[in-house]
Amino acid sequence: MRRPERARGSGGVQRAARGAAPGIPAPEASGAIELDLEFSADQELLRQTVRRFLAERAPLSYVRSMLDDHRGTSDEVWSGLARLGATGLLVPEEHGGAGMGMVDMAVVLEELGRAVHPGPFASSAVGATSLILAAGGDDARASLLPGLASGERVGTVAVYEPGRRGDWAQPTTTARPEGDGWVLTGRKVHVPDAVAADLLLVTAAADGLAVFVVERDAPGLEVGATPPVDGTRKRGALVLDDVPGRRLDRGDATATLAETIDRLAVAGVIDGVGAASRALELAVDYARERRQFERPIGAFQAVQHLCADMLRAVELARAAAYYACWAADAAPARERHRAVTMARAFAADELYRVGASAIQVHGGIGFTWEHDVHLYYKRLLTLQHEGGGATDHLEELASLILD
């Protein structure tokens, strides 16, 4: 899927990753964006490679074996993704990555969603990487990004706190200078892949909103797993008691954190698009095979309507999510946030309904542990619950439009 451009060369992927394509007006110039929904040859190759790897190395039998594993991945699978270059897609070439953008990353994320992959990919390859790129200086990038790109290190971002829902801009976690560094005190919850991560980017109040790099084995740090509804999404909590850390940003980090949170949010939507598209495929296949009254149940209009509604939801969510990925790379901050909020508003309810409809098409067998469709339903259910319902996002969208 190309960004808004008309170029057909194989180099178009990396060129567009660095900004709006020549000949296409920027969002602030005309308010109209032309989006080419055709994948480039490079992106198709990337998609096929990742899909083949996941089918061979991380099938649903592997996913089930990881449901009770707090890390959510095996060393073999994680290193395999790293060897493919997936973990370093967003990392600049000078730091060992591919130097690509969020649209290219979305190709990988959608395949991970189709496979309901449980590993710490988005938290590290999108969240931690994006925050270091946005807030870190040259020294921080040089010391942190190569390990994330190679998969030798796993990162995550810790921003949310107990009882504060989505209010991340004014943390109660505090940081104070001590010696040549800082020490942090507070609590963080809903930390994605906290147990798997050895590099934690923690927000705290310190002459404004600041981000600190905390090592997994730092003294005073307690990391615990949170019991999940969906075993393919690992979450955890942090307790920090005078934990040493080094500051990542050089000033107030509100803008860079807002960008990172938007990127993580649209990564979740893209993951949901992948899961929903696979749930739709399972439902259609079952409707062709299951027979009632000597006919496939797919011949009945009620089932056809369910499948048609599922297809509509998946395609609209995909278009909104890929546009938001383009905006994350090339659009101004306001347009990026609007695009991400719009994609989340649609996906929150519509993609969940795709999962629910897939269960309904399968009937009683869809509720059983042995059938795979419930894995996709849970994936889409947690997308709705963790990201907030459509009402929350529509209120945010209205505030952006009316402001």
Image: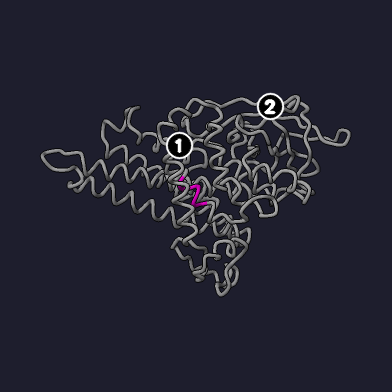
Q: Is residue 392 positioned above or below 323 on the image?
A: above
**Extreme residue toward the right, this view:** 179
Query: Which image quadrant is residue 289 in?
Result: top left
Q: Secondary structure at mark 2?
A: strand
Q: Nearer the viewer, residue 195 or 208?
A: 195
Viewport quadrant of the C terminus = bottom right
Q: Which residue is mark 1?
A: 58
| Rendering coords of residue 260 (x, y %) | 63, 48
Q: Does residue 240 appear to the left or right of 81 in the view shown? A: right
Mark 2 residue crowding within 10 angstroms, few (<14) / some (14–19) / many (20+)? some
The mark that comes first in sequence, 2 or 1, is: 1
Which span of residues is magenta-colored? 106-111
Residue 239: mark: 2
User: In percent of the image, x 27 and y 45: which residue is there?
Assistant: 284
- Main secondary structure of the magenta stretch: helix
**Extreme residue toward the bottom, this view:** 23
Amino acid type, mark 2 = Val
**Marks 2 and 1 close (CB-CB < 8 Å):** no
Q: Is residue 36 positioned above or below 243 on the image?
A: below
Q: How much space separates mark 2 and mark 1, taking CA atoms?
A: 32 Å
Q: Is residue 355 magenta?
A: no
Q: Secondary structure at mark 1?
A: loop
